[in-house]
Image: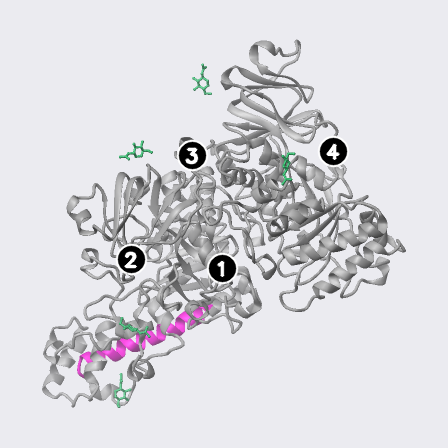
Amino acid sequence: MSEKLFGTPLDVQDSWTRKVQRRSSWILPFLPLPAALLAYALLSVIQRPPAPANASEILSICDSLHEIPGVPKDFHSRTVSDRFVEGTKATFIRNATIWTGGRDGTELVYGDVLLDGGIVKALGYIPDGLLKGVKGRVNTINAYGSWVTPGLIDLHSHVGMLSAPLLKGAFDVGSRNGPMVPWMRSLDGFNTRDDARVLAIAGGVTTGLVLPGSGNAVGGQAFPFKFRKTQERSPSSMLIEPPFNLNDTAREPGTPLRWRHMKHATGENQLRYGTRMDSTWAFREGYEEARKIKVAQDEYCAKAKAGLWNDIKGIPFPYSLHWEALVDVLRGRVKVNCHTYEAVDIDFLARLTNEFKFPLAALHHSHEAYLVPDVIKKMWGKPPAVAIFATNARYKREAYRGSEFAPRILADNGIKVVMKSDHPVLDSRYLAYEAQQAHYYSLPSNLALSSITTTPAIAAGLDHRIGYIREGYDADLVIWDSNPLVLGATPKQVFIDGIPQLENPYVNEKPDWLQKVPRTPDFEDEIKATLEYEGLPPLTTKAKSKNVLFLNVQSLWTRQGDSIQPSFQAESANSSVVIVTDGKLSCFGDKGSCATASRVSYDVVDLKGGSISTGLTTSGAPVGLQEIPSEASTNDGALYDPFVGVPPVLGDDGTSIFASDGLQLQGRDALLAYRSGVTSSVSAWSAGSLFSDGVMFDGISVAFRTGAAHSLDKGAIIKSKAALHISISRSMFGSGPSVSTQIATLRRLLLRSPSDDAGNWFHKAALGEIPLVISVGSADLMANLIRLKKEVESETGSTMKWTFARASEAHLLANEIASSGISILLTRPRLFPTQWDDKRIIPGPPLSADSAISTLLKHNITVGLGTGENWEARNVRFDLAWAALDSGGELSLPEVLKLATVNMDHIFDIERGDGHLDDLVAFEGGTALDLESKVVAIISPEREVVELL
Ligand SMILES: *[C@@H]1O[C@H](CO)[C@@H](O)[C@H](O)[C@H]1NC(C)=O
Ligand SMILES: *[C@@H]1O[C@H](CO)[C@@H](O)[C@H](O)[C@H]1NC(C)=O
Ligand SMILES: *[C@@H]1O[C@H](CO)[C@@H](O)[C@H](O)[C@H]1NC(C)=O
Ligand SMILES: *[C@@H]1O[C@H](CO)[C@@H](O)[C@H](O)[C@H]1NC(C)=O
Ligand SMILES: *[C@@H]1O[C@H](CO)[C@@H](O)[C@H](O)[C@H]1NC(C)=O
């Protein structure tokens, strides 16, 4: 980079280049200038003051002011990508089902694809001539009909900024320097060593728009990165079409500008700078500053172009390095991505964009966007796309009205829908899962796939080269092991710039029925209610019945002893029924051999080939203890940290806190879980969660029915003191006690005689009278704890009931865990190296043959599959299904159902008798594991009722 380019006030980023053709002064009179200036200019041609030495530079800046980004004219005739890596072989993919992204996501091509030079050379039928051209340097892959899609694009990612494992030395997501930081660049904080980058590729994500955080109103410049590693190993070399203000010399004469990207954020996150009204003013003040600079530039240039050099003599071109990016927004050169949740903030953006006349590329998170489509349409220019999560909601007040039906409702209103991860909020690797869920909840399949490919490509201004499979497009594509909208769809191979990214992929060959777009249930009534109740439709049951006749039941799965068994499995559902009389199963199986009781009237429910199975249990998240996690007043509140201090009035170490005393029922996450077949939860505080730095005591959990009206409701409390919970974790910010202090504390509590209440509970744990659940990630710490267990057991002569929760690295110690009789509660069903303690995960297919679950189960360890956050509780059945799919058929339906039924009871010592009183869940259109089925009823023999949803 020359001094001249980057050191002078002429560094007007995109708007300037030395290479722009100089305009001869004789053209001036013909320029479309305001009439007065034109007349003045004509005069000054006669009496022109001498032009300054740098006049031509000034004029070329002025000429470039009105340029907007575009695609080079000959772009699509390129034969090689600018990102091509010398030596990359060509790839010939045969016999693929190619979803191209074309025709609004409905176009399919059956045939072949040829990749060469980092681009798609041809697809469909490949002419022999082309194949001859790559002879001797081509890899051929027979796809055997597999689905091939464009590489996935994550429009909202912090990969490289909040890195995995999270270390405070790489916490590069935002700025603490006030609400306006348009100068900040995510590129400058991008850590190429983020483990998540490789994991994201394994999920098919090839490009991510890496945004600064949402802690600033104008949060700085974002950059689209391709996630493959580069030979140069630099962040810069991972950028796709970086704007020329990063490197002016990269711009060839005649090349149009490239898009810049920016992050804005409104609402709650700005409260750190005052109120909403303060931050909206910050926006307007900042944009007014930019507007003044833009006007000054235009006026300056009008004079220069008119030859009025005297008027601007000695005056530098108006320019501000602080505000230039916002000036570029006003010049229409920036894709602005705005974090905006609520109607009030969306409304503000409609006013802001019209006041300052700039378009937005996308609204992010926008949990209320579906409620105000007309406001979105009022925004200046084209309505922005809306980038959202599928089911992650209610974590803060702004997200309370978030709906799983938002993608569908937005699409109905003609608004473009993008599904995104906000990685690491969700693991970018599972971006496809967001589209799968959106589809399950009624977004049409073409739009669901577009929402993670073409739609984000368009929103990022990159749809001339990514987001589609087309001739001349970047060779970024994914070969899938199933239809990509099927749960658990996993890449068999991922190409970025034509380079295969998975070295030795572990592929499960999936059957034909997983190669089709899933059928989706009918949610029309739910969608209507969602709109009618503005995002808060009642979640209580529609009706209760004592006597129900279920028709067309394919199978019935119940607990029998320590396993889940088929009570029946029909060849054809049509002839099978399940009859519930007085809230209890009275007959099931063949229609002919089952009779309804006489003189009893039955409600009839057609399960349409569906299935009935034992209600699921979740654990790990504080379901029933929080309503809106970030709002203390909706929650039980914080636990005392005995290492910091417990008020004497609490009596002892403050460790015998019962979650049952804080229970609150009828919360939305609990009810949504209930309605998804998760009929009970074992909840405790999770002190060991991400930012609770080294806090150790999580109290005593409660097992309860997620659908109960209140804690006195019949059957509400299943076990009031389920288990004693502690966390052994390393403190990220160094403020908590050391791990050795935590383990020493545990040793002392387990071994001392019960002198007080807390001691009493640990004493019970030492005697094996109450389960002890220890949240711990690292295998080293688990090993140390296993030694402690032996030490305590040899001292007391008892056998303790231990479970390791979190347990990210448990697979490394599977033998030892198995032989110590310790159970595992995975609170993150698909592992992620969140912190150092979780670093050594087993990633599962396609990166490893085994997953954590399959490894642990092979060692006969009792595994429970839980969740980490309340909103996830509703998705337990999909997590179970995923475990089965990842196992390549090794784990059957009853085996995975155990992970959230029998095994949970085992972990928490819950006695449910012989299974006759278990809640049963009726699914229409499939089993508990199908992304095609829907819960329609819950049968509760204990309460002698069937709840019809
Ligand atoms: C393409 O794959 C399908 C599905 O596996 C198969 O039925 C067909 O025979 C294959 N065709 C060729 C030409 O390999
Ligand atoms: C800028 O771009 C030019 C031309 O593409 C390239 O040769 C040079 O290495 C780049 N400089 C930097 C600092 O990236
Ligand atoms: C042109 O030169 C004048 C006099 O040296 C200086 O004041 C001005 O900043 C320069 N303008 C530009 C755009 O470089
Ligand atoms: C069985 O039910 C399915 C759908 O539930 C239907 O398509 C099919 O025709 C039925 N078969 C018989 C023999 O009734
Ligand atoms: C797990 O249990 C099964 C059945 O009891 C047994 O065959 C197998 O050897 C056990 N595996 C291990 C690793 O102990």
Residue named by callout 3: 514
Indicate the secondary structure of the residue bearing disc 3. Answer: helix
Instruction: Return the residue nearer the eye: 180 or 859.
Output: 859
Label disc, if present, on residue 178 of the rendered structure: none
Q: Are marks 4 and 1 in contact (CB under 8 Å)?
A: no
Q: In this view, does 610 lie above or below 290?
A: above
Indicate the secondary structure of the residue bearing disc 1. Answer: helix
Q: Which amino acid does label 3 sit on?
A: Leu
Q: Earlier in the sequence, mark 3 or mark 4?
A: 3
Mark 4 to mark 1 CA distance (whole Å) = 45 Å
* Residue at image coords 40%, 31%: 512
Mark 4 to mark 2 CA distance (whole Å) = 64 Å
Indicate the secondary structure of the residue bearing disc 4. Answer: loop
Residue named by callout 2: 88
Q: Earlier in the sequence, mark 2 or mark 3?
A: 2
Q: Which of marks 1 and 3 is nearer the N terminus?
A: 1
Q: Is residue 684 above or below residue 595?
A: below
109 vs 779, left or right, is: left
- Give the magenta range: 283-307
Residue named by callout 1: 195
Q: Do the residues labelled 4 and 2 touch (CB within 8 Å)?
A: no
* Residue at image coords 29%, 57%: 88
Q: Which amino acid does label 1 sit on?
A: Asp
Q: What residue type is labelled 4?
A: Gly
22 vs 801, left or right, is: left
Nearer to us of marks 2 and 1 is 2
Mark 1 to mark 3 CA distance (whole Å) = 30 Å
Residue named by callout 4: 715
Q: Are marks 2 and 1 in contact (CB under 8 Å)?
A: no
Q: Earlier in the sequence, mark 2 or mark 1?
A: 2
